Image: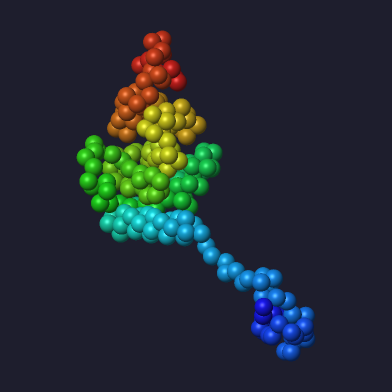
Amino acid sequence: MSVKCPKCRLVDFPQNKVCGRCGAVLVPISAAKPERKTRVPRMVRRAAVCLTICLSLLIGFYLSLIVSAEKPDIEQKAAIRRAIGTLSAKGFAREAFLLSYATTYRSNDNWLNASVAKENAYAATNFPFEIMTVYPDFFTYPSDDVERAAILLHESKHLEGKNEHDAYKFVWMNRVRLGWTRDKYAASPVWQNVRKQTRDNAPELFTCPDKESGDCTE
């Protein structure tokens, strides 16, 4: 049986007791620990490849939504910033932060939004990509930045993953805090439209016959 140096791995004759190269005590090859190469398990490698592919597809999908729509112009960006500033000043810090730092704005439909039939809207959000399309009506119909803030407040709930019911309900329940009240904005088309949509999506708020138009929040 041959012997092997456990230190420098030199194979020597069995009669030798000490390694002629480094002086270490020789051991039989059968007793020497075989070298083991660390191998990544096949399932781990497959999972890593799959994850890489999925991430690449997700990034590509996101970039396609971004590049297929136009950025807002300078005036539109200024109007969006003013509306976000209104939200921040009224105490909606979390929503204002989300709208300021986690949202990418576009001024027209990306390819995904364009492929879906929809009614006229002030804005639309692609969750979870945090892309918000702000349509021309957002800049035309609101009477001031408070109404634009109400629209962005609605969309901020979609950025959080909330549905239409929760978004309309949140805005309607917090309209007084925002300063968006019936006595000041009842004649506004934005007020009338949002009120109608809120009644359709959150009918439980309009079940009080002793209140104005059955609105339990009045």
Residue at 47% x, 59% y is 42
Q: Please give left or right for residue 56 compared with residue 44 in the image.
A: left
Q: In the rendered image, which quarter contains the C terminus?
A: top left
Q: Is residue 51 above or below residue 157?
A: below
Q: Quadrant of residue 172?
A: top left
33 shown above or below 46: below
Tell me how many marks there are: 0
Front residue (pair 7, 166): 7
Where is residue 119 shown, x and y percent of the image? Answer: 24, 36
Residue 66 can be seen in this image = no
Viewed as shown, does residue 177 lie left or right of 12?
Answer: left
Q: Residue at x 28, y 39 (%)?
A: 121
65 versus 183 height, above or below: below
Inspect this view and state whether residue 162 appears: yes
Closer-to-camera residue (147/69): 69
Q: Position of residue 124 (x, y in %)?
A: 33, 43
Q: Residue 29 location, x and y as percent?
A: 66, 75
The quarter of the displayed image where residue 171 is located: top left
